[in-house]
Image (tube, helix red, strand yellow):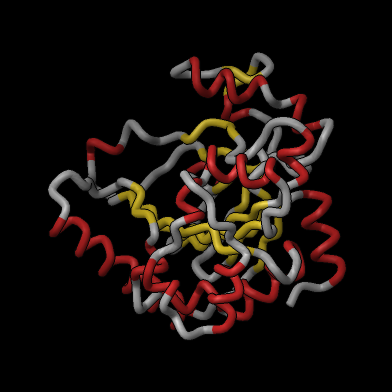
Amino acid sequence: MLTKQQTIGFETFGLLLIRSAFSAQEIERIKIGSDQLWASELATNPKFCDGDCLTSAVERSDQLRWLVEDDRIFLSMQQLLGKDFIWSGSESHRRPADDIDLQRYTDHPWHADRGGDGRELEYTRIKIMLYLQPMRKQTGALRVIPGSHRLPLHSSLCSFEEAHHKNAKPLYFGTTGNDVPSYALETEPGDMIMFNQALYHAVYGKAGQRQYLALKYAAKPTTEHHIESLKQRSSNVFEPDEILRQHPSERIQQMLEGIPQVTL
């Protein structure tokens, strides 16, 4: 459960960093589950490369599925999104320490996963990040611009999106991405990051082995705009994994019940 001050902080800054949310034993279990998923995918999918993004990761793993409804996550999402929030998917990311071909992918420039006009920002979606190695500012920690999930700051940063998509080495208001005023979320395994997906964030200087899980949740869509937004940005939300559909957990079924039936 989050404290009142934590919920106010999330609304104000668009993020929470909860230290030591998971134990060393739990993180080891998560690592084992993640490694097993990657090994299976690499063995059965010849087009899949180590370093790609593995989707529906948590749903497919017996070692990871418990995270979907874990108290520390589920109860927090109820507080931040409302009791009828929905599940919107998961990802596993891995960067091997010794893969030379990946050394050029050291930066993930400034962007917002979700953004645009005021109506878009009013529909809250949250991503939870669990890094499995220590993260530091200069070697790939997640950087954020606190408060950029809200107007007017969000609209003031919209040019960041254009710079990100049009330039190999973009500048932001005349400065490099590495020097944009921001806050680096330096973490240890077991720490948990929650952030509003309209928040501007980036990564610079990725180095060494890098693994993390991302779990995604959203407020229940109640308008046509919410549904259209999900169609454009996360259409897989409407097709939850069959393992979850058949899962006996009341919590999981509650998260799926709020997903509207739509034609894609």
Measured from the top left, where is residue 58 in percent x and y?
A: 41, 67
Quadrant housing residue 187: bottom right
Residue 28 in view here? no
Q: Residue at x 52, y 61 (%)?
A: 215
Measured from the top left, where is residue 70 in percent x and y?
A: 56, 79
Measured from the top left, where is residue 15 in percent x and y?
A: 71, 54
Q: Nearer the viewer, residue 235 or 148?
A: 235
Q: Residue at x 48, y 58 (%)?
A: 89
Residue 145 in view here? yes
Left or right? Give the position of 209 relative to 41.
right
Left or right? Give the position of 94 relative to 27.
left
Q: Residue at x 44, y 57 (%)?
A: 239
Left or right? Give the position of 164 relative to 115.
left
Q: Residue at x 18, y 56 (%)?
A: 42
Quadrant housing residue 74: bottom right
Quadrant housing residue 224: top right
Q: Nearer the viewer, residue 49 or 134?
A: 49
Looking at the picture, does residue 21 appear above or below residue 222?
below
